[in-house]
Image: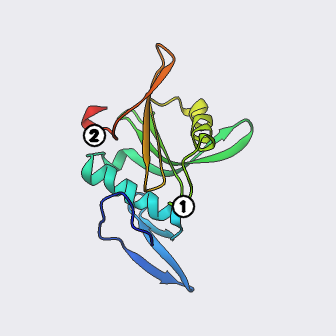
Amino acid sequence: MLALNLPSFDVKIQQRDGKNLIFDSLRKKFVALTPEEWVRQHFVHYLTEVKGYPKGLLANEIQLELNGTRKRCDTVLYNKELRARMIVEYKAPHVPITQAVFDQITRYNMVLKVEYLIVSNGIGHYCCRIDYTTMKYSFLQEIPAYSEL
């Protein structure tokens, strides 16, 4: 797999039926190793081990309903009251982060109404904070540590 702009870690990979699988520490199971999953597992490791996000408040592949269709958020951070606080959307490293990617995560946020949106393809990472009082958003210089949220 491609080197990412994220810290490396002890990745657990196995083969089953000729397919590569990677261990998802949040779902506690092996899942198909796709380029997007490679980014997800590295980014979750970054959030938990570098930025101090509690694993117990993060969840992968969260289903929601939007305009009568089912969608899935890649990763959601919850607060201690289990209210969604952050959505993270991943793309494969070769997929550029475009307006369409931000439009996708913004649609998810119409349902969850979180404070923070993050988009990453493992190479570039973008985080914005939404202020619902002023109805404005601002891009942050870096991904905040959990203690800064």
Residue in front for this viewpoint, 38 or 79: 38
Q: Position of residue 99 (x, y in %)?
A: 60, 39
Three-letter amino acid code at the position of disc 1: His
Disc 2 on helix, strand or loop? loop
Q: Is residue 116 above or below residue 46?
A: above
Three-letter amino acid code at the position of disc 2: Ala
Q: Is residue 88 above or below residue 134?
A: below
Q: Which mark is residue 145?
A: 2
Q: Label 1, on which residue?
A: 94
Q: Position of residue 56 (x, y in %)?
A: 35, 48
Packing grade of label 1 (10 A; few <14, some 14-19, many >=20) is few
Q: Which image quarter: residue 144?
A: top left
Distance Cα–Cα, label 1 vs label 2: 27 Å
Q: Counting residues from the N terminus, which is met first, the one under dot 1 or under dot 2?
A: 1
Foreground tag (1 vs 2)? 1
In which quadrant is the N terminus drawn?
A: bottom left
Q: Is residue 17 above or below residue 92?
A: below
The residue sitting at 37% across, 33% down in the picture is 140
Residue in front for this viewpoint, 140 or 11: 140
